[in-house]
Image (cartoon, helix red, strand yellow):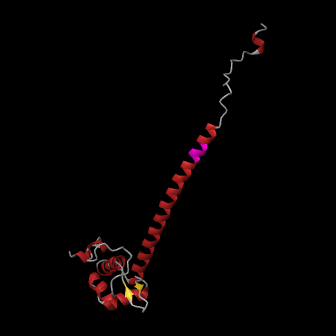
Amino acid sequence: MSKRDRPEAGFADLPAGHLAEDAPVFVISVAAELAGMHPQTLRQYDRVGLVTPGRTAGGGRRYSPRDVAVLRMVQRLSQDEGINLAGIKRIIDLENQVAALQSRVEELLVEITEMGMRARAAEAAVHASYRRDLVPFKSMSVVPRNHFFR
């Protein structure tokens, strides 16, 4: 199995050094070669919305390492799993939605942690404000009234 056929093959094994995952740096011919596809296939996938490369001022496509990884996944799903392009688009959309939801959950967890810290600080401030000059009163046992008059 070659690098491009592995599902885990991604931008880390591309000859790009320390590129940002979303950096639109590859021209279509390079991206096609990295993904093991024909450039016309990449154009078709762009038209149907499977991958959306960045654009230069002149309109030329520029693919990021993430785009190349998506292209590899599309190829694997279509060739190995027999999934049509509409199904693959749905899978990609759902994966993007899951990623967005996971990101939101992480944001909410941070917010919950911060709110908990603020609540504990507010509680500590309330306890610190208690008057220290008051003496605690210990209740005495109450004897029923009719107990004395037998």
Relative to residue 18, is residue 131 drawn left or right? right
Residue 122 within the segment the image draws in magenta: yes
Q: Which residue occupies 53% across, 57% down?
A: 111
Residue 149 at x, y = what percent?
A: 79, 8
Q: Which residue occupies 31% across, 81% down?
A: 75
Decide which of 38, 111 is in the foreground and name it.
111
Magenta segment's dominant SS is: helix
The residue stretch that appears in magenta: 119-123
Residue 28 within the segment the image draws in magenta: no
Q: Which residue occupies 45% across, 76% down?
A: 93
Q: Can the viewer see residue 122 in this picture?
A: yes
Q: Can the viewer see residue 10 in this picture?
A: no
Decide which of 45, 149 is in the foreground and name it.
45
Q: Is residue 37 above or below residue 97?
A: below
Decide which of 20, 145 is in the foreground and name it.
20
What is the total number of numbered labels drawn onto the structure image?
A: 0
Residue 33 at x, y = what percent?
A: 27, 85
Quadrant of residue 25 within the rendered picture: bottom left
Residue 115 at x, y = what percent?
A: 56, 52
